[in-house]
């Protein structure tokens, strides 16, 4: 039984413990204008006080800890708890980091209580963190602190390590507040350069390399692409363009990848799916190795999501019947977004703007990395399979992928990047930008379904003389590399020389998700389709549809180098891969350097090769 003195000490610590949840970002919510979705912290405080009056095992006073948690998605706050759990914790999903700034970076872990007697729901887990400038974790930490987590956020924890030096590598570790010998694995991370750092000084004068991923479906195979990037490339920052998880089940039992649960609908469903995906060994090491910058696509909620529904759900009575849970689309989207913010090392851009994850990173004068949300934020109706009308409205002027606010912000960000003297403008977004005529049809779930919006982007680049723009795309499960120009304009744009282009698109294949060229399509059969595609699409310079993989993008003041990697086998965990193609873009040229890919590739088909045949 707790002594009277202990209880008094615990109550005396309430004020000092208030900050303990402020550093766990998993509690933050972008729904600040919807207070009815937040936890009632007054009620929580009353619950804590009542709980303190009861007998309690496996706890100790919260006195002496200062809460530095990052604001959390849902608004839960346990900082006034008089007790913390001391029965032991397990860092079940290792560590991660993300959204690096020049003087701070987010650190993530998951600290799940263990022991014969688990804590009451009123008792949080307390975790400390330390970040060092050396991998031995020796000397004084650069920043250290503690934070609470609890069942409210699935025992996830996000903190912001602060007071860091720009353009510097760091190593970090978490520990149990009540047992300093119980520690997490060590994670590696880094900050980015300050916005005013000269381009040739960014990353110490060495090219800054990004690894770019999309579309990782658990049941389709092992996430070997993440492991190859972590072990076999010099990538410093990992960028994920969406479909980090999938809501569907599929059947991966034959390769040991059976998906748990059901089609996702509730917060419990989405948490379970994220939990399972993060057990993949390659994904774990990739999160330990480098900071991530991520955006979501559709499958983080559900297939072909737009602002008011998905392929199988909306807020009608029929749309609410997709799941035995009875969840409607709005319920589903809120649950998905909440779980994403709990499990991903991503910042809250604007707590007063629900759903906003579009944001910009100024990395010295070398580049601006602009991350868009062309899917969940304010997208107009897309192809949900039964609504064939979308084909007839693809050219409607006011159709938008981003919504007016984000679209205006995007144009302003591009212009501001040029004005501040940044050399490169790198745009991370979800879907293929270039027009792709696929046997007379178009993917109206991509930019081909929002043609006026695409023209507005191109017009802004051309009219503003905004050079050195590189658009990164995912979603399609195939590789496409194109010059950026107005579709079907072979008067001002020359597909052979690239003259007249205003930039380049690098679209990457999936980590595991199946090819649109056909299930398990062979390289030879995929190349037959690519031959046709590069012939009939003026801007398209390379097409490859067989291999799963990723690409890296290395930037210096003089050129951009994109190297595509192909996985030979995703049915077992391995690092068996090869570089399928490499492309150069020279600063100021706004096109792929000719001959494209040096004139040869190890997979897929170049336009120059198709022309020769």
Image (spheres, rainbow, N blue to C red):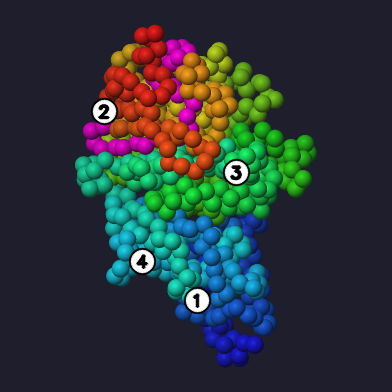
Q: How far apart are marks 4 and 3 (CA)?
A: 39 Å
Residues 364 and 351: in front is 364
- Residue 408 position, x and y percent, is 45, 35
- Quadrant where the N terminus sits is bottom right
Who's the residue at 46% across and 79% down the image?
Answer: 64
Who's the residue at 32% across and 23% down the image?
Answer: 597
Any magenta on residue 195?
A: no
Reading the image, the residue beneath label 3 is 257
**3 or 1: mark nearer the eye:** 3
Assess disc 2: are there few (<14), some (14-19) or many (≥20) residues with their C-alpha within 10 Å of its C-alpha. some
Q: Work out whether mark 2 precedes mark 4 in sequence or the reverse, and give the earlier one.
A: 4
The magenta span reads 530-559
Reading the image, the residue beneath label 4 is 143
Q: Dot 1: what SS?
A: loop
- The image shows residue 97, relative to residue 461, as above or below, that is below
- The image shows residue 355, relative to residue 612, as above or below, that is below
| Residue 586: numbered disc | 2
Q: How far apart are marks 4 and 1 (CA)?
A: 19 Å
Q: Work out whether mark 1 precedes mark 2 in sequence or the reverse, and give the earlier one.
A: 1
> How many numbered marks does the figure carry?
4
Reading the image, the residue beneath label 1 is 178
Q: Work out whether mark 3 precedes mark 2 in sequence or the reverse, and give the earlier one.
A: 3
Is residue 341 in view from this perspective?
no
Q: In this view, does 584 lie to the left or right of 183?
A: left
- Residue 549 position, x and y percent, is 45, 35
Q: In which quarter of the image is residue 162?
A: bottom left
């Amino acid at each position: 039984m707790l002594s009277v003195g202990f209880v008094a000490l615990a109550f005396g610590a309430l004020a000092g413990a208030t900050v303990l949840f402020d550093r766990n970002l998993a509690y933050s919510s972008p729904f600040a204008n919807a207070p009815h979705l937040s936890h009632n912290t007054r009620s929580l405080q009353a619950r804590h006080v009542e709980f303190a009056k009861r007998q309690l095992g496996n706890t100790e006073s919260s006195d002496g800890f200062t809460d530095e948690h990052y604001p959390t998605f849902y608004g839960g706050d346990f900082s006034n708890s008089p007790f913390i759990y001391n029965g032991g914790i397990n860092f079940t999903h290792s560590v991660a980091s993300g959204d690096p700034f020049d003087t701070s970076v987010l650190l993530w872990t998951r600290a799940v209580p263990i022991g014969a007697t688990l804590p009451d729901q009123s008792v949080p887990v307390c975790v400390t963190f330390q970040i060092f400038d050396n991998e031995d974790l020796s000397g004084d930490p650069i920043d250290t602190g503690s934070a609470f987590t609890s069942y409210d956020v699935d025992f996830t924890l996000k903190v912001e390590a602060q007071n860091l030096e720009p353009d510097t590598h760091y190593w970090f570790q978490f520990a149990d507040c009540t047992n300093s010998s119980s520690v997490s694995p060590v994670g590696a991370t880094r900050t980015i350069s300050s916005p005013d750092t000269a381009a040739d000084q960014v990353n110490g004068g060495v090219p800054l390399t990004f690894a770019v991923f999309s579309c990782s479906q658990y049941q389709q195979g092992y996430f070997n692409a993440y492991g190859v990037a972590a072990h076999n490339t010099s990538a410093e920052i990992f960028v994920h363009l969406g479909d980090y998880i999938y809501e569907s089940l599929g059947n991966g039992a034959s390769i040991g990848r059976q998906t748990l649960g059901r089609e996702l609908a509730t917060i419990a469903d989405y948490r379970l799916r994220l939990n399972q995906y993060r057990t993949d060994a390659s994904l774990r090491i990739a999160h330990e190795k480098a900071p991530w910058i991520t955006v979501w696509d559709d499958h983080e909620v559900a297939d072909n999501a737009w602002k008011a529904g998905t392929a199988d759900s909306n807020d009608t009575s029929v749309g609410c019947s997709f799941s035995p849970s009875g969840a409607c689309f709005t319920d589903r989207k809120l649950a998905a977004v909440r779980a994403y913010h709990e499990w991903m090392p991503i910042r809250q851009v604007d707590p007063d703007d629900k759903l906003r994850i579009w944001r910009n990173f100024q990395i010295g004068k070398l580049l601006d990395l602009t991350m868009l949300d062309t899917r969940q934020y304010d997208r107009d109706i897309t192809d949900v399979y039964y609504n064939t009308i979308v084909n007839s409205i693809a050219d409607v002027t006011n159709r938008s992928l981003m919504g007016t606010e984000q679209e205006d912000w995007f144009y302003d960000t591009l212009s501001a990047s040029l004005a501040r003297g940044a050399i490169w403008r790198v745009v991370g977004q979800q879907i293929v930008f270039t027009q792709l005529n696929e046997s007379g049809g178009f993917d109206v779930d991509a930019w081909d379904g929002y043609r006026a919006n695409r023209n507005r982007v191109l017009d802004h680049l051309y009219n503003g003389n905004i050079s050195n723009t590189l658009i990164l795309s995912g979603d399609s499960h195939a590789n496409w590399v194109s010059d950026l120009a107005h579709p079907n304009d072979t008067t001002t744009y020359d597909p052979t020389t690239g003259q007249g282009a205003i930039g380049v698109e690098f679209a990457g294949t999936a980590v595991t998700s199946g090819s649109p060229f056909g299930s398990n399509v062979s390289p030879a059969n995929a190349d037959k389709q690519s031959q046709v595609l590069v012939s009939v699409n003026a801007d398209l310079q390379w097409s490859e549809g067989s291999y799963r993989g990723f690409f890296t993008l290395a930037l210096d003041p003089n050129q951009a180098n994109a190297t595509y990697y192909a996985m030979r086998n995703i049915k077992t965990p391995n690092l068996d891969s090869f570089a399928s193609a490499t492309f150069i873009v020279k600063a100021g040229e706004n096109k792929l350097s000719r001959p494209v890919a040096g004139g040869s590739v190890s997979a897929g088909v170049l336009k120059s090769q198709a022309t020769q045949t």
